[in-house]
Image (cartoon, rainbow, N blue to C red):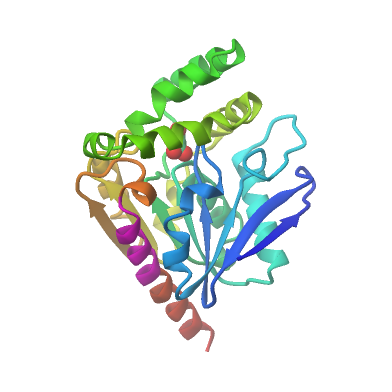
Amino acid sequence: MQERYIRTEKCPEVFYRKLGQGAPVLLIHGFPDDGNLWRRVMPLLSETCTVIVPDLPGTGKSIYSGGGISIEELADSMLSILHTERISKVVVAGHSMGGYIALAMAANCPEIMAGLSLVHSTSQADSAEKKQQREKVIRLIRNGGKDTFIKGMIPGLFAPHFQTKDPEGVAMQIGNSLKLASGTLTGFYEAMINRPERTFVLSEARFPVQFISGKEDSVVPFDITMKLSDLPSVSFVSVYEEVGHMSMLERPESLAADLEAFSHYCLDAALKTTL
Ligand code: MLT
């Protein structure tokens, strides 16, 4: 595995790992995580793909200079990695908040997209109620309630079946999330509140779009994903039973196989159109 750092205007160090050879795939983690989230998928997918896994600025080994960050700036930092790697066509898979970032990349730089995979994610903006919930959490964290928030929210990301079967897995996820600084958590929440609706990206997509959904996802419900999956001209849909919001931990083999099949389809299609 190669480990690299790049510098961008707002981020003195953006760290990413690169593994494997073949079709390039960028895996963007969500909230509240770092690139380590993909640890079970990366080795499987890298058997036939070049897999790039960043730590978003402010998480893992990536440093953020502070002062607020937007989903668009996070997307720019991902595009900088691709430019550094001289990648001109890529499949971008984003988990939840990572999907919001992938959609911003697709809106700003559609020519680089061979395919977009929304892994438990949505193109819809936050509802007024969701924004209020996030603002409440921001206040809680600013008042020293980071641990309360993390310990309360993480278990609910997993399906009940997984919580019973693998309590150590849930505990490990809580431990990983507790490593994130309070400022990173509130910064990401503000970025999510401010992100615009990007459903037009799906209806106008000139590249295939994959939707990965857990039947028991409480963050991005299955029925919303099904409605969105009607919009692109080419869609791939995978629905996992007894899975919540975290298929990369709950069902990593299935997710890796679905990402692999999708990535090869997209990059073969992209190659044909450039011949
Ligand atoms: C995530 O998993 O990235 C978050 O749950 C996304 C969100 O809060 O909208």
Quadrant in which the N terminus is drawn:
bottom right
Q: Residue at 61% of width from left, 59% of height from top? A: 17
Q: Residue at 55% of width from left, 49% of height from top? A: 35
In the image, is residue 258 part of the stretch drawn in magenta? yes
Q: Position of residue 97 (x, y in %)?
A: 49, 41
Q: Residue at 39% of width from left, 64% of height from top? A: 259
Q: Position of residue 221 (x, y in %)?
A: 28, 38
Nearer to us in this view, 37 or 135: 37
Q: Which residues are magenta?
A: 251-262
Residue 206: tell me if it is visible: no
40 on left or right of 17 = left
Q: Position of residue 228 (x, y in %)?
A: 32, 49
- 245 up-or-down from 209: above or below: above
Q: Quadrant of ligand 1?
A: top left
- 118 up-or-down from 143: above or below: below
Q: Position of residue 200 (x, y in %)?
A: 44, 50
* The quarter of the displayed image where residue 47 is located: bottom left
* The quarter of the displayed image where residue 143 is located: top right
Nearer to us in this view, 219 or 5: 5
229 on left or right of 74 = left
Residue 101: tell me if it is visible: yes
- 251 up-or-down from 129: above or below: below
Residue most extreme to the bottom: 275
In the image, is residue 26 part of the stretch drawn in magenta? no
Nearer to us in this view, 146 or 131: 146
